[in-house]
Amino acid sequence: MLTNLYHKDFISTEDWSVDELNAMVEAGGELKRRFAFGEPHDHILRAKTLFMLFFEESTRTRNSFEAGVAQLGGHGIYLTPSATQVGHGENAQDTGRVLERYGHGIAVRDCRTDIGQAYQYELASHIDIPVISMQDDVDHPCQAMADLMTIREKFGDDLRGRKFTIAWTYAPKYVRPLSMPQALVMLMTRWGMDVTLAHPPGFELMPKCLDAARKHAAENGTKFEEINDMDEAFRDSDIVYAKSWGPITITEDPDEVQAMCDKHKDWITNERRMDLSKKSSIYMHCMPIDRGYEVTPGVVDGPHSVIYDEAENRLHIQKALMALTMGGRL
Ligand code: CP
């Protein structure tokens, strides 16, 4: 297992090799085993600090990072722009260079379109301690890695030939970022799976992420297709990952977004569609879920659903990430 990842940033899975990402999954499995058996592992980050800067809300990300760093013997500090001088415009250089005098890693959630990921690379360019993306406008690398870990637990390490479907679903209320589907098409095409992306016209992902997915598929001799038919996407799938995202490449105006979404209320994950997938298929969603809109109760709480396993694996994969990059011993 590779262990020379000390101080390596994790802003996108695109910045890590397959061997490096495999090391994270292996370490995550080892830490999950130790957690299950109650074996102490709080020496790994003893007295080390992770600063967690959130520009947006979170349930899973904040709590899994905070619990995770504590279990490794360290401490997580929850920050927001309004609780820091970031809210008054202090720049990435000054914020980063001060925080690195106090601690050992900085994690950021910033989903502002065309700003979030760029802010993290800017931060990383000024400091030596690792910068970790807790989701941005382009990628959600920790969630995607927890999902990969979950898929490998269900289907084994050799995923070649498995059909992975990411499908858009309808949801009301607020504009969801593109980073989750983008993270999935960029990562899963590197693991030998045939990836199908389905959405109504107007809900396209960022061109650079689609290009990355096409490149990975070509390099790995696998398939990456983009279609506008939800039924066709579900047919014969091994993994169905169906969630809502906004038409952000066209508009972020809430009224325009809602009007575009409202034309496609029939894009829901239901029992009929799950029956088109393989009998052994799994239903995935990163959560939070708009129950009754994105998915029927029978599917989300039914036998195909692995949503809580995915959420749990956020803890284990992030502990592995912090252990490897913030300097400890497994
Ligand atoms: N999946 C995920 O990132 O959840 P939160 O928004 O609750 O952190």
Image: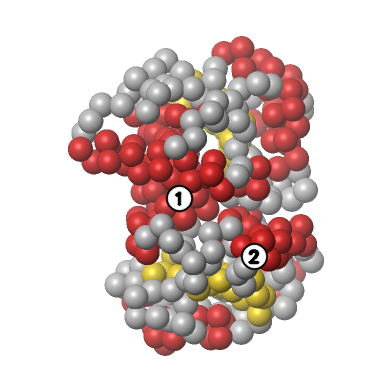
- The answer to whether one can see residue 73 in this image is no
Q: Amino acid at mark 2?
A: Ala
Q: Residue at the location (62% across, 81% down)?
A: 264
Side of 300 relative to 52 (left or right): left
Q: Residue at x 51, y 25 (%)?
A: 326
Q: Are marks 2 and 1 in contact (CB under 8 Å)?
A: no
Total tally of numbered discs in the picture: 2
For the point 50% across and 80% down, the residue is 234
- Mark 1 residue type: Ala
Task: Examine the image and state in which quarter residue 206 appears.
Answer: bottom right
- Residue beneath label 1, please? 146
Residue 300: assigned label = none
Query: Quarter of the image holding residue 194?
Result: bottom right
Left or right of 264? Residue 252 is right
Q: Is residue 240 left or right of residue 79?
A: left
Q: Quadrant of the N terminus?
A: top left
Q: Which residue is mark 2?
A: 217
290 displayed left or right of 246: left
Figure coloring: secondary structure
**Label 2 SS:** helix
Quadrant assignment for the C terminus: top left
Spatial distance from mark 2 to mark 1, Cα to Cα?
21 Å
Image x and y of residue 156, in percent: 37, 60
Residue 143, given in percent of the width and then of the height, sits at 50, 50
Among the two numbered marks 2 and 1 on one chain, the one whose residue lies closer to the N terminus: 1
* Image depth: mark 2 or mark 1 in front: 2
User: How far across and how far down the image is residue 189, in percent?
Assistant: 59, 62
